[in-house]
């Protein structure tokens, strides 16, 4: 009987571990976090680093900041703020940089009632007060870029980073050169865009040919912007029609269980959620059966 109890406890612990790994124990909601700072850090001068957390109740959030020998914490403020017509939590860390050099700012861990997340580590260059400042590097990636579009279809693109530095940049600074047959126009940035780490937004309409923008580097004052490449396939249905000729011979095909189970479900997240639920309830069923067997054996001995 003791062995049965130990076996049941082991199974329950295993369920808890697997539930956490597959996301069953946590809420499916995702809390997005943005980080930005307005000025590059300088030794001995107050420097503000901001977290924007897409969660309305600031009191329910706990943040574990990384330990660093190159920054001394001066003050932390945490408050709700209305942004993009939603209530979010803004956390400002005021640091005093201790020494100059290039360092890695490790992840900030954000814990909320139904789960947790963490920021991405990034490179941070701290300048000395009287030195010729070495350039800070910010990596920009294209957001909302589809893998393929149709000719004449409008695309909204944005250049963004996980950190934001406020600079008075020249008009059209990030506007790329596009191939012939493309209509590109810049869009106005809002304050919410900047706080979301977006540096530029564009409206792009392809008229012919594929879209390819190579990676390149831009520099303004002491900041270097490394911009990723962009490739989008443009489909012209007027000239690229595929005619399918049915095969007269009967075709042999196979259907697996997963195809039958998930027929009609196109969302990959829903498929994964169903798989996790099936896995969870299968283990739970085995535990219940095991408990009944152990009780039966115990009563039989008596």
Image (cartoon, helix red, strand yellow):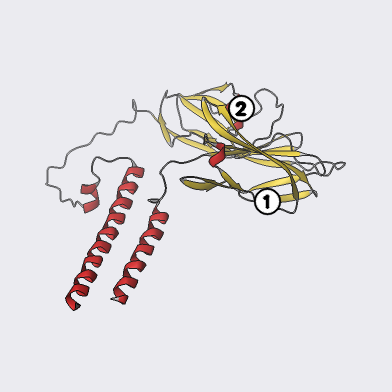
Front residue of this view, candidates 83 and 12: 12
Please provide percent x and percent y for residue 20. 42, 55
Give neighbour class at mark 2: few <14, some 14-19, many 20+ (Cα, 10 Å).
few
Front residue of this view, candidates 129 and 291: 291
For the residues labelled 2 and 1, say whether their Cβ atoms are less than 8 Å apart.
no
Image quarter in which the N terminus is found? bottom left
Judged left or right of residue 24, residue 90 is right
Give the residue at the far bottom of this rendering.
301
Tell me if residue 247 comes above or below residue 157 in the rendering. Answer: below
Kindly identify which residue carries mark 1. Answer: 104
Quarter of the image holding residue 5? bottom left
Front residue of this view, candidates 197 and 287: 287
Judged left or right of residue 37, residue 286 is left
Numbered disc 2: secondary structure = loop
Numbered disc 1: secondary structure = strand
Separation (CA) of disc 2 from disc 1? 30 Å
Front residue of this view, candidates 175 and 222: 222
Q: Residue at x 49, y 27 (%)?
A: 156
Q: Nearer the viewer, mark 2 or mark 1?
A: 1
Tell me if residue 170 comes above or below residue 123 in the rendering. Answer: above
Q: Is residue 177 visible?
A: no
* Residue 34's disc number: none
Kindly identify which residue carries mark 2. Answer: 175
Tell me if residue 137 comes above or below residue 189 in the rendering. Answer: below
Q: Residue at x 17, y 39 (%)?
A: 246
Please provide percent x and percent y for residue 290. 25, 67
Image quarter in which the C terminus is found? bottom left
């Amino acid at each position: 009987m003791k062995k049965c109890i130990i076996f049941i406890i082991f199974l329950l612990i295993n369920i808890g571990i697997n539930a956490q790994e597959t996301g069953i124990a946590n809420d499916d909601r995702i809390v997005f976090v943005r980080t930005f700072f307005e000025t590059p850090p300088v030794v001995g001068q107050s420097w503000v680093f901001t977290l924007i957390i897409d969660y309305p109740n600031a009191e329910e959030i706990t943040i574990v900041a990384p330990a660093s020998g190159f920054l001394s914490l001066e003050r932390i403020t945490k408050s709700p703020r209305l942004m993009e017509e939603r209530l979010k939590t803004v956390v400002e860390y005021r640091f005093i940089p201790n020494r100059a050099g290039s360092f890695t700012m490790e992840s900030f861990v954000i814990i909320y009632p139904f789960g947790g997340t963490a920021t991405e580590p990034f490179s941070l260059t701290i300048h000395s007060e009287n030195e010729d400042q070495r350039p800070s590097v910010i990596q920009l990636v294209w957001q909302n870029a589809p893998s393929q579009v149709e000719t004449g279809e409008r695309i909204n693109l944005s250049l963004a980073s996980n950190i934001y530095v406020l600079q008075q940049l020249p008009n059209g600074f990030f506007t790329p050169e596009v191939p012939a047959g493309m209509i590109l126009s810049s869009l106005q940035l809002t304050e919410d865009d900047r706080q979301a780490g977006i540096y530029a937004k564009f409206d792009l309409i392809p008229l012919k040919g594929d879209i390819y923008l190579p990676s390149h580097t831009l520099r303004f004052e002491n900041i270097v912007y490394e911009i990723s490449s962009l490739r989008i396939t443009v489909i012209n249905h007027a000239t690229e029609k595929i005619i399918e000729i049915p095969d007269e011979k009967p075709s042999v095909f196979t259907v697996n269980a997963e195809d039958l189970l998930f027929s009609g479900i196109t969302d990959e997240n829903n498929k994964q959620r169903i798989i996790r639920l099936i896995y969870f309830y299968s283990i739970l069923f085995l535990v219940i059966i095991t408990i009944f067997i152990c009780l039966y054996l115990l009563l039989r001995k008596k």
